[in-house]
Amino acid sequence: MFARKLLRARLRGLPSRASAVCVLAAALGAMSVVVPAVAQPSSAAQPASASKRVEVTLPFEKYVLPNGLEVILHEDRRTPIVAVNVWYHVGSKDEAAGKNGFAHLFEHVMFQGSKNVGEDLFFKYLERAGASERNGTTNTDRTNYFETVPSNQLGLVLWLESDRMGWLLDHADEKTFASQRDVVKNERRQRYENAPYGLVSQFVNAALFPEGHPYHLLTIGTPQDLDAASMEDVRGFFKTYYVPGNATLVIAGDIDKAKTKPLVEKYFGSIPAGAKPVVKTAADPGDLKSEKRLAVEADVELPRVQIAWVTPPFFAKGDAELDFVAQVLATGKSSRLYKRLVHDLQIAQDVYARQASSQLASTFHIMVTLKRDQSPEKVLQIIDEEVEKLRKEAPTEDELTRAKARTLSDMVFQMEEVTARADTLNMYNQYTGDPGYLSKDLARYEGVKLADVQQAAATLLPATRRVVTVVTPTKGAPKAGRLVSSTAGKQGK
């Protein structure tokens, strides 16, 4: 997702949040930017938690067509390019039992042609038009499609997007679905089944969330469900979820809003409304009540340890705080786990921590790839020690200052690119209902205090409700991993 933790590598040279904001003011001329006095790294007089607001807003106009299609316009005339970004508010969480992978399948099918666009011509039209971005992605919560083209090609992109929204099924037939089903299955083989540690994420998901939970299975889809799908099944999925009332169209960049609105009406206004589908939006943390231990064997060179928790949904209380917990633990060479495991003890190859935010529930992960012949038990002990320290004592002011600088820099600098701005407007629209939530999101992170980080670690990362996975190198095992055992550990409260 564009709106989370991008461009971190290019920002490592920034020494403080003040530097980031100074560059921001010069870079984002099309946005409303307020640059107040910014707290410097910690001092007794000015603790990190008392930093002042950085206000950055994305101006937009939002309206709805009679057929239910949401439209969001963001005007930026500085560069003669325009980004078109469509979110269908359906992801793998919305698939019925036995239909795993349908959302991802349609991501592929949508590029194969529609009533007025011939087979395999979608990308060719865009290439001839000079497109710099063109793709689609699917996750648990949504499916998106995006193109960035010279602004004089806006009409072409709107025609392409509207034709597949309204008339995909006039072209797609059994042959189309069969070919794309094979493409998806091959993608699964490459990314999961034949990749080192590739199926570990599926084992962890299945342990974190019970069978039947919207996040129990991977978005990529299962071969059994894809093979069992009938033409009637896949047509029904499209007719249910790919309707104007379940989609949001963002147009951002070098546009005149007064001239763009008639274009939107011309291409999308005649698409039949269809019934607005019911999609899952209510928080659902599952039922993880105890610690689970997974033993996995894989034909890999290095052992791996992973700990995962179910955590609050995207934008809920605790979500931002856990982003900072992850950074204190494992972002940068001065982070606690990196310093102990990689630098000091030299028993780990790398460390990683992340709050993976999603609509119904999020997951927090700590992952360590060990050096050859090192002890997973020793690594687990050190992880537990460092997490327990955060449960009992807040991070230092310097740690929180660095985490805030990194996060805010990521969030504001990604807005330089109009492609990212378009996706950000769509992301905030789906998850908060407010496309212009960026300024509130910045405030969400800026408002986190030292004690908030400690409380998040103490209450949201319990030692008794988590999934602990140990991957043991085993010759002859599948490279992607095979689950050897799953056992219950300490009981939670």
Image: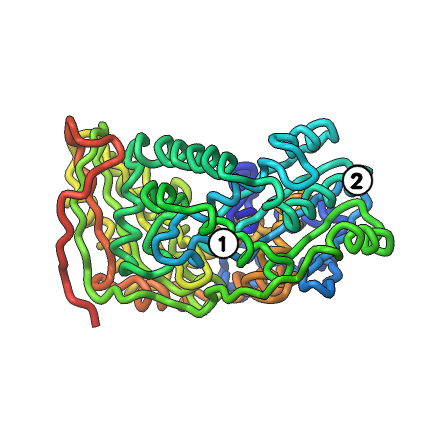
- Which residue is depicted at the point 49% across and 57% down? 42
- Which residue is depicted at the point 73% across and 65% down? 66
| Mark with earlier residue (1, 2) | 2
Q: Nearer the viewer, mark 1 or mark 2?
A: 1
Instruction: Please tell me which residue lies in front, 56 or 79.
Output: 79
- Which residue is depicted at the point 23% across and 63% down? 465
Alpha-carbon span between mark 1 and mark 2: 33 Å
Q: What is the quadrant of the C terminus in the image?
A: bottom left
Q: Is residue 179 left or right of residue 166?
A: left
Instruction: Please tell me which residue lies in front, 84 or 67.
Output: 67
Is 416 located above or below residue 397 in the figure?
above
Q: Which residue is mark 2?
A: 151
Q: Provide residue 453's location: percent of width, then percent of height.
A: 40, 63
Instruction: Please tell me which residue lies in front, 417 or 360.
Output: 360
Element type at mark 1:
helix
Image-quadrant location for residue 254: top right
Q: Amino acid at mark 1?
A: Phe
Q: Which residue is mark 1?
A: 237
What colour scheme does the image use? rainbow
Instruction: Please tell me which residue lies in front, 363 or 429.
Output: 429
Q: Amino acid at mark 2?
A: Ser
Image-quadrant location for residue 155: top right
Q: Provide residue 396's location: percent of width, then percent of height.
A: 40, 58
Mark carried by residue 317: none
- Which residue is depicted at the point 81% across and 50% down? 263
